Amino acid sequence: MTDDFHKPVRRPSETFDRLFPAQDPAEVSRAAHSTAAALLSRVREEPDAGAVERLVTFTARHGIDDIAELWSRSPAKTLPGALWRLYLVQLSIHEDAATAALLYDRGRVELRSSDDVVAGAPVPAGPGELVTLIDTILRGAFQGDFAVALDRAAAFCRVQASGATHLADDYEPTEPGRATELTTRALRLSSFAVELAAAAKLWRRDSLT
């Protein structure tokens, strides 16, 4: 793993509940929707590999705060809300790829579904492979079928949520504090999976705005 994955960025667990200075909610919402739509449409209409790579590596280079200011308060079933969740999932992998790989491997074994196939991780998937996978998924959001990228991210979250749940059960007898952390993580990942899958359905109906 390179040093790029250890930049001093805000941890996802802290950004979930971050509050910002009071502003006009309607104005914030309009700004979130307009920036998300403009960003996505511009990249799609004028493909530029350099621009896509800058978007994919944005949080690794600059942290999450700038994106959070724009999109973090947007509802899940909106374009800015979906993009925000994609970036949070990516950041969680970049910050602790080793734990992500552990959760993913356990979830892949325990979860009786095709989610690991949909997500597209190799078997076995180590930390480096998961970093590559989540970057590929985010790259696909800007270059490929946005709904497919959302579905892949949702599947990825379901696999990780399963892994976190089963590891929490393992830790419960001896390290209840760690078990609680893993259970909380599993709940967040499960919520993200539901929200990203719902956003994918809306996108396919041209209803994700």
Image (cartoon, helix red, strand yellow):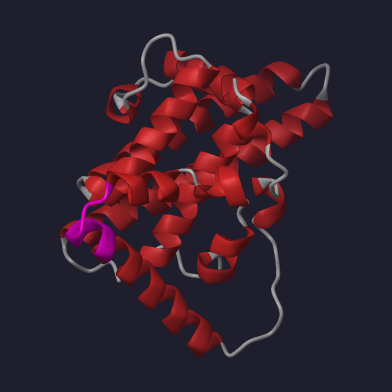
- Residue at the spot x=71%, y=80% of the render? 21
Is there any visible trace of residue 78 in the rendered image? no
In this rendering, is residue 5 above or below 204? above
In this rendering, is residue 53 above or below 176? below
In this rendering, is residue 90 above or below 173? below
Q: Picture coordinates of residue 120 (x, y %)?
A: 31, 25
Instruction: Please state the extent of the stretch shown in magenta in the rendering.
Output: 42-48
Q: Picture coordinates of residue 39 (x, y %)?
A: 34, 65
Is there any visible trace of residue 35 in the rendered image? yes
Q: Picture coordinates of residue 203 (x, y %)?
A: 23, 59
User: Is 44 included in the stretch rendered in magenta?
Assistant: yes
In this rendering, is residue 139 above or below 55? above
Count the marks: 0
Q: In which quarter of the image is the C terminus?
A: bottom left
> In the shown orientation, is residue 23 left or right of residue 147?
right
Q: In which quarter of the image is the N terminus?
A: top right
User: Is 74 included in the stretch rendered in magenta?
Assistant: no
- Residue at the spot x=24%, y=43% of the render? 148
Q: Nearer the viewer, residue 82 or 107?
A: 82
- Residue at the spot x=46%, y=36% of the render? 157
- Residue at the spot x=21%, y=52% of the render? 47
Q: Nearer the viewer, residue 60 or 185?
A: 60
Q: Picture coordinates of residue 18 (x, y %)?
A: 70, 63
> In the shown orientation, is residue 110 left or right of residue 77?
right
